């Protein structure tokens, strides 16, 4: 009887665990993967010409939303874009630069591609295409569209895009601010945006990334910058984890494909708050 009860208890506990895991997957952290609210309506075209600081270019809202044309606010910031980056390939492959910006600097809704190693870049494209790299939040449009585009892109275009983005010098467009309180945010265009009401809330265990100037972000300005709010002590705790290692964290980081080796120092291309790590040789 005792054994039976124990088995029942264990089974119930395991079921609980499974349910908890499923729920945890369903309720993904919205601060990390913000979803547009169901009633979200993107701003409508008013035919005005949009401008951003230090650029002679001008685009209407409709032009900035053209999936087959990367907005190119600062042509002097990068070499000429290959066709697939500037205009994509109709009908399925959208211009890489439309999402990732002309110089690959990216934003919180996608990824910074500047200076990614060529081999790593090509592998990611092939993994998206084969389904080896996928998303657990299929309803998030930016990733869903990235994956859709990878299905029909040619190897020649992957090669050209990889050569272009890997040739660019990595640059950060983020500023980290540690704070116990953070401005209340809403979701616009798949990113968190400060409500501007001045209201604050505890940051808890979240990282809240917002555009410094939402209008420049909306115009897809490649020089738009982002503030990354993090709980107090996050950066030093992260650095400590990298330096001292915890459960193989340091070794794992040293072996990430984008870690660059210069002498015995590895530099990571501005991925999150990790900027430089010293890696011990393998035993
Ligand atoms: C609709 C927007 C969109 C377009 C267009 C787009 N991407 Fe992406 N891309 C994304 C998103 C979102 C991610 C991050 C996916 C994730 O979370 O795993 C991404 C990730 C990537 C990565 C992986 C980066 C990393 O650090 O691992 C590569 C490489 C990449 N894109 C290349 C391209 C290329 C090449 C093109 C053009 C053919 C392109 N993308 C077009 C949205 C886009």
Image (tube, rainbow, N blue to C red):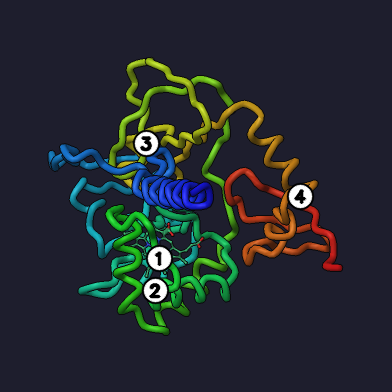
| Marked residue nearer the N-terminal end (3 or 4) | 3
Q: Nearer the viewer, residue 169 or 235?
A: 235
Circle 2 sits on which residue?
131
Q: Is mark 1 within 8 Å of ligand 1?
A: no
Circle 1 sits on which residue?
134
Q: CA distance from mark 2 to mark 3?
A: 28 Å
**Can the viewer see residue 107?**
no
| Marked residue nearer the N-terminal end (1 or 4) | 1
217 up-or-down from 247: above or below: above
Circle 3 sits on which residue?
192
Residue at horizontal 14 percent and vertical 40 percent from the top: 44
Estimate the x, y position of residue 10 in percent, counting from the top left: 49, 50
- Asked whether the residues under the numbered discs 3 and 1 touch, taking CB atoms below 8 Å apart as contact, a structural biologist would say no
Q: CA distance from mark 3 to mark 1?
A: 23 Å
Closest to the camera, between mark 3 and mark 1, is: 1
**Can the viewer see residue 146?**
yes
Query: Is residue 271 toward the left or the right of residue 210 in the image?
Result: right
- Asked whether the residues under the numbered discs 4 and 2 touch, taking CB atoms below 8 Å apart as contact, a structural biologist would say no
Query: Is residue 195 toward the left or the right of residue 281 in the image?
Result: left
Residue 245 image label: 4
| Marked residue nearer the N-terminal end (2 or 3) | 2
């Amino acid at each position: 009887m005792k054994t039976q009860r124990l088995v029942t208890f264990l089974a119930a506990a395991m079921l609980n665990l499974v349910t908890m895991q499923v729920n945890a997957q369903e309720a993904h952290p919205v601060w990390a993967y913000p979803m547009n609210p169901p009633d979200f309506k993107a701003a409508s075209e008013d035919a005005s010409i949009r401008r951003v600081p230090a650029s002679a270019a001008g685009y209407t809202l409709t032009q900035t939303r053209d999936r087959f044309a990367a907005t190119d606010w600062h042509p002097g910031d990068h070499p000429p874009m290959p066709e697939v980056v500037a205009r994509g390939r109709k009908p399925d492959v959208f211009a890489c630069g439309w999402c990732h910006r002309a110089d690959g600097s990216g934003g919180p809704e996608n990824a910074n591609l500047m200076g990614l190693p060529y081999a790593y870049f090509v592998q990611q494209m092939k993994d998206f295409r084969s389904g080896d790299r996928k998303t657990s939040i299929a309803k998030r449009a930016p990733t869903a569209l990235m994956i859709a585009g990878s299905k029909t892109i040619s190897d020649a275009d992957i090669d050209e895009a990889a050569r272009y983005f890997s040739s660019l010098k990595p640059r950060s467009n983020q500023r980290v601010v540690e704070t116990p309180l953070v401005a209340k945010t809403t979701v616009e265009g798949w990113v968190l945006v400060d409500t501007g009401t001045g209201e604050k809330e505890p940051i808890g265990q979240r990282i809240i990334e917002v555009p410094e100037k939402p209008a420049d972000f909306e115009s897809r300005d490649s020089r738009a910058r982002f503030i990354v709010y993090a709980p107090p002590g996050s950066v030093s705790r992260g650095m400590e984890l990298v330096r001292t290692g915890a459960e193989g964290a340091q070794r794992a980081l040293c072996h990430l494909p984008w870690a660059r080796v210069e002498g015995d120092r590895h530099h990571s291309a501005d991925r999150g708050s990790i900027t430089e790590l010293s890696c011990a040789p393998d035993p």
